[in-house]
Image (cartoon, rainbow, N blue to C red):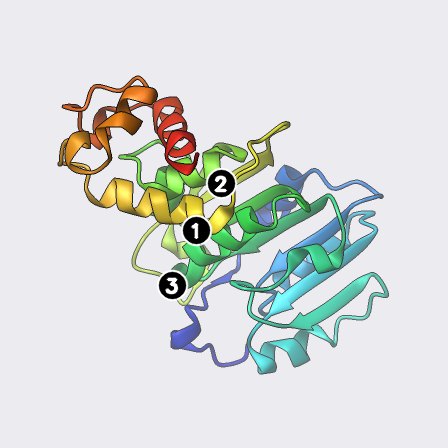
């Protein structure tokens, strides 16, 4: 195995049983285009290619890993050397299925980029730090990423994975999340929505009247003495829409 780079947060998934399970959760059919985020040593790549998938794109930022991936002989595989945190996913087609063991240090950025290109990504299956997985799926205290993702995707916590399944062993557990794009999701500008949510959740202890104009709160039907953590997802979304108008 090639030497892994700590600065890229590389942890290779070794369990063949888990690799197979991940591909099953992706529900690959013969018409699918699958995008793998972080191909690494190709363990998951090879498992995906065992299906009748139409085409597989693997996005890898490490040049040495790219060279290893290019050694996999399968005409359906396209290896792309790029940064998945900013890559234009729509350049690869429509109705894409994403999968990946995401580096802990950039996992949130990759999930954010997935949401940015939601019109082209119908399903995503990501392995991330368990704490992040729980937050994305709303199974722990919500943060900006909870509402950000769940506005556009239905989220599901699939399973947990202990450190022993990886090399090198991480210091924390991993969790697998499944994102399925919602039909009729709201037409919202991604970056403005994220800016609103990060501001909103960073001041959750303050009263709404100290954060937003009272006339906007009144239009949204919200008690100005409430605090951000007391609002439901629907109320937060309604407030955002009022503020945008």
**Quadrant of residue 100 within the rendered picture:** bottom right
Q: Secondary structure at mark 1?
A: strand
Residue 125: x %, y % from top left: 57, 44
- Say if mark 1 contacts mark 2, CB within 8 Å: yes
Residue 144: x %, y % from top left: 34, 42
Q: Quadrant of the C terminus?
A: top left
Which numbered disc flags the more N-terminal residue, 3 or 2? 3
Judge from the rendering whether residue 144 lies leftward or rightward of residue 43; answer left or right: left
Vertical order, 224 against 200 (above or below): above
Q: Secondary structure at mark 2?
A: strand
Judge from the rendering whether residue 123 lies leftward or rightward of residue 172; answer left or right: right
| Mark seen at residue 128 | 1
- At 14% from the left and 31% from the top, the residue drawn is 207
Residue 36: x %, y % from top left: 64, 57
* Residues at marks 3 and 2, CA–CA distance in whole angstroms: 17 Å
* Residues at marks 3 and 1, CA–CA distance in whole angstroms: 10 Å
Residue 109 visible in rendering: yes
Which numbered disc flags the more N-terminal residue, 1 or 2? 1
- At 45% from the left and 57% from the top, the residue drawn is 109
Judge from the rendering whether residue 212 lies leftward or rightward of residue 4; answer left or right: left
Judge from the rendering whether residue 38 lies leftward or rightward of residue 203; answer left or right: right
Q: Quadrant of the N terminus?
A: bottom right
Residue 130 visible in rendering: no
Q: Which residue is mark 2?
A: 177
Q: Nearer the viewer, residue 210 or 68?
A: 210
Assess disc 1: are there few (<14), some (14-19) or many (≥20) residues with their C-alpha within 10 Å of its C-alpha.
many
Q: Mark 3 or mark 1: which is in front?
A: 3
């Amino acid at each position: 195995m090639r030497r892994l780079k700590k600065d890229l947060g590389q942890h290779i998934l070794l369990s063949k049983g888990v690799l197979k399970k991940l591909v099953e959760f992706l529900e690959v059919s013969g018409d699918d285009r699958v995008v793998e985020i972080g191909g690494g040593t190709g363990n998951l790549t090879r498992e995906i290619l065992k299906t009748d998938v139409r085409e597989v794109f693997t996005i890898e930022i490490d040049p040495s890993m790219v060279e290893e991936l290019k050694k996999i002989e399968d005409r359906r595989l396209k290896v792309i050397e790029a940064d998945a945190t900013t890559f234009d996913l729509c350049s690869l087609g429509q109705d894409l299925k994403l999968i990946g063991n995401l580096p802990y240090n950039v996992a949130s950025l990759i999930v954010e980029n997935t949401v940015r290109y939601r019109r082209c990504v119908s399903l995503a299956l990501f392995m991330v730090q368990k704490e992040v997985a729980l937050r994305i799926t709303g199974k722990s205290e919500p943060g900006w990423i909870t509402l950000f993702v769940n506005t556009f995707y239905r989220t599901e916590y699939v399973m947990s994975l202990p450190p022993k399944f990886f090399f090198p062993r991480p210091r924390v557990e991993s969790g697998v999340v499944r994102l399925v794009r919602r039909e009729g999701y709201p037409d919202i500008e991604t970056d403005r929505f994220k800016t609103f949510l990060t501001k909103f959740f960073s001041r959750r202890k303050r009263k709404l009247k100290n954060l937003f104009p009272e006339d906007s709160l009144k239009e949204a039907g919200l008690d100005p003495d409430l605090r951000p953590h007391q609002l439901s997802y629907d109320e937060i979304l309604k407030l955002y829409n009022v503020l945008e108008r």
